[in-house]
Image (tube, rainbow, N blue to C red):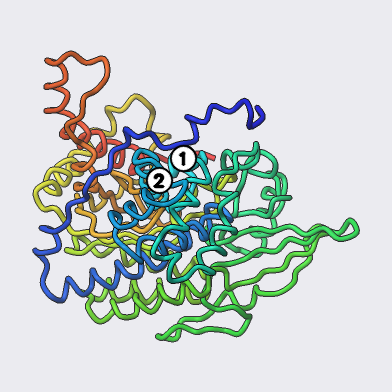
Amino acid sequence: MASTNDLDYSQYIISREIDINILDCATAFAGLTEKEKLYAHYLCRASWEGAHICLLQTSPESPGIFLLLQQLFHAESVEELKERALLSDNGPSKEEFENFLIYAAAFYGNLGNYKSFGDTKFVPDLPKEKLQSIVFSSKAYETSSKRLEQLWNDCGDTMYSLTSKTQQLGFGEQGLSTYYSSNCVKADAEFVKGFMKEKEIETYNTRLFKEENDGHVTYILRLASVATTAEPCPGASGEQDTVASLVGSHEFNGCTFKVERGDYSGILKNVVENLDKAKEFTANDNELSMLKNYIHSFNTGSVQAHKDGSKFWIRDKGPIVETYIGFIETYRDPFGVRAEYEGFVSVVNKEMSAKFTSLVSSAEQLLPELPWPPAYEKDKFLRPDFTSLDVLGFGSSGIPVGINIPNYDDIRQEEGFKNVSLGNVLAARSVDKKVTFLSDEDQELFTKLKAPAFEVQVGLHELLGHGSGKTLC
């Protein structure tokens, strides 16, 4: 890889042309009953509390950058921060301050300093000393100078670092990953997969660390849970803690394995507290059972409990307030098996959902027309719940326009799944913006048809792609 002197820095900064759009959910929330609003509120709280995990899953410096930005923006308004910065000695120009705001917005949007789509690091587009002047001229620094100095010293250098290892996410020397210790390579992940299969441990909520001592290798497998010891934690309704017996030391093919739980314990405790409050405002038994299982999963580290909760979630057809929370997508893991935390809360858009329901009704007629044999389709097509939702809160590293979940293949085959189109995300992305290389006439046509065309694309992608296709290994 090229040295930092040869880098094209334009690849690692956020363009000033980037869109910052409003995600409109006021009407959707206003249409809820008081009970539904409280249900949505506590689920949103749970989602955003858990989103702090994404910072830890992105890079070592992301939590520190987050705390630094929070201190700056909590202490005063953006305009006040700007006024102080521009008047400070060696302060930034107006454009440099705007570039700082663009960096902050991108950081919050990606919940870390790596792009959620592409896994490339991005750095502030202003000199480091100018950003330091913004920090040290702030009201936050005025009231908590030692705290701000410590945060800046902890993350100032790494925020700007673009060594060959830190330019992108990846294994070992190929990139950076907090799912693994820096000495882990793909071969380690492959080897550990055998141990986990033997012990029937799922990978979704784990991280892997490797220690070497006099030629002997010890792998430490950390499970995300509130519980930090092997002491059993039965569920509120008597559910067994099946993970407790796995905690401890094991031998496998000449290596020692230590299974630990308690990764992200403090954060997950806050998630559980809010899910517990949300239980009081559920609309039916499916929602109540779903939350009980999620709570048990987060308390103990049991992926099976999350699968059980997902079954009740699938059975909860057409809820007014839709939600899903857990360790869901594996895109950011270089091995593709360990999942990023995600939590979203949304409200059904009835008009668009009616269109998707019509598409579902036609699915069994459409599937035989696709240009591949039935062997590539699921053994049995289970009619999914396909709704268009307006997002109220989405705690993760980026908001998609469509989702097909759960990702557990056994649950999808036995219980089915749900297709979700996020309507207000689609609307926010379909802004009236000049597109390069289009004539004025074509620009008008493009602007008119972009949103409805994208709705069709998302519908077909989720239903006839993820929804009906078979995972091939």
Number of numbered markers: 2
Q: Is residue 413 visible?
A: no
The answer to whether residue 303 of the structure is visible from this angle is: yes
Instruction: State how far apart marks 2 and 1 are (Cα).
Output: 7 Å
Of the numbered discs 2 and 1, the one sitting upstream in the chain is 2
User: In the figure, is residue 459 to the left or right of 310?
Assistant: left
Q: Position of residue 165 (x, y in %)?
A: 65, 40
Q: Amino acid at mark 1?
A: Leu
* Quarter occupied by residue 374: top left
Identify the residue position indicated by label 2 in the image.
100
Name the residue that disc number 1 marks. Answer: 126
**Given contact means CB atoms under 8 Å apart, are the residues at marks 2 and 1 in contact?**
yes
Q: Is residue 437 left or right of residue 235?
A: left
Query: With respect to residue 350, does 299 lie above or below?
Result: below
Seen at 53% across and 73% down, the residue is 265
Looking at the image, which residue is at 35% across and 66% down? 75
Query: Looking at the image, is 34 positioned above or below residue 345?
Result: below
Q: Secondary structure at mark 2?
A: helix
Q: Nearer the viewer, residue 261 or 129?
A: 129
> Where 164 sits versus 141, above or below?
above
**Looking at the picture, which amino acid does disc 2 mark?**
Phe
Residue in front for this viewpoint, 180 or 115: 115
Question: Residue 373 appears at what percent x and percent y?
Answer: 38, 29
Of residues 207 and 351, which is closer to you in this image?
207
- The crowding category of the residue bearing disc 1, from other C-alpha atoms within 10 Å (few below 14, some 14 to 19, many at least 20), is some
User: Residue at position x 10%, y 64% from top?
Assistant: 30
Residue 182 in the image: x percent, y percent? 69, 51
